[in-house]
Amino acid sequence: TTIANASNFNEPHSHQGKVTPFEPGDPNVKLDKKALTLLTSGNPYKTQIQSGTAGRGMVVQDVHAPTNIVWGRILDYNNYVNMVPKTVESSNYKVVEHKPTKANPLSQTIYTRMKVGFP
């Protein structure tokens, strides 16, 4: 007999559905020889970054394209279903425009719902 522990729909999850907001900037990740070899061969380097009881996945990929094209693809959340494996649904439900300043260079805050499927 195998017993698996899983979430209980009747009890709140420990993180309450909230994660620490992403802070743009240098992720301060050092690439070792294995990572650099992967990148040199044209492959992505994938890793996970732990932060307390939570964490983030990170992928480093050399992309030979203009910056505006790269950011356009990254921010095209409505099209992630067609670009990101295992993404079942993805849509922006709110976009807040900002006037960029020195203190806050962001021009938008994008709120997106994503549903990821597993085989």
Image (spheres, rainbow, N blue to C red):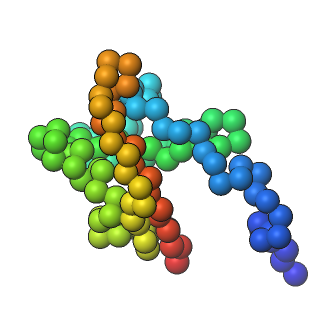
Q: In this view, does 109 lie above or below 10?
A: above
Q: Where is residue 68 in the image (x, y as percent from the top left)?
A: 16, 42
Q: In this view, does 42 lie to the left or right of 106?
A: left
**72 relative position to 85: left or right:** left
Q: Can you give x and y, in whole percent of width and height, for residue 119 in the image?
A: 52, 77
Q: Nearer the viewer, residue 64 or 91?
A: 91
Counting every numbered tag in the picture gives 0
Q: Which residue lies furthest to the right in this view?
A: 1
Q: Which residue is drawn at 41% across and 66% down?
A: 90
Rendering coords of residue 110 (x, y %): 39, 49
**Residue lying furthest top:** 102
On screen, residue 118 versus residue 75, left or right, reads: right
The residue positioned 49% from the left and 47% from the top of the image is 57
Q: Quadrant of residue 78?
A: bottom left
Q: Which residue is more in the foreground, 42 or 71?
A: 71
Q: Is residue 100 above or below residue 80?
A: above
Q: Which residue is drawn at 33% across and 36% down?
A: 98
- Asked whether residue 38 appears in the rendered view, the answer is no
Q: In this rendering, is residue 41 above or below 23?
A: below
Q: Residue 109 sits in which quadrant? A: top left
Q: Which corner quadrant holds the N terminus?
A: bottom right
Tell me where residue 105 appears, x and y as whole percent. 32, 27
Q: Does residue 76 lie above or below 97 as drawn? A: below
Observer able to see residue 28: yes
Judge from the rendering whether residue 81 lies leftward or rightward of residue 68; answer left or right: right
Task: Please name the residue shown 22% across and 49% down the image.
Answer: 72
The part of the image, by quadrant, that contains residue 62 is top left
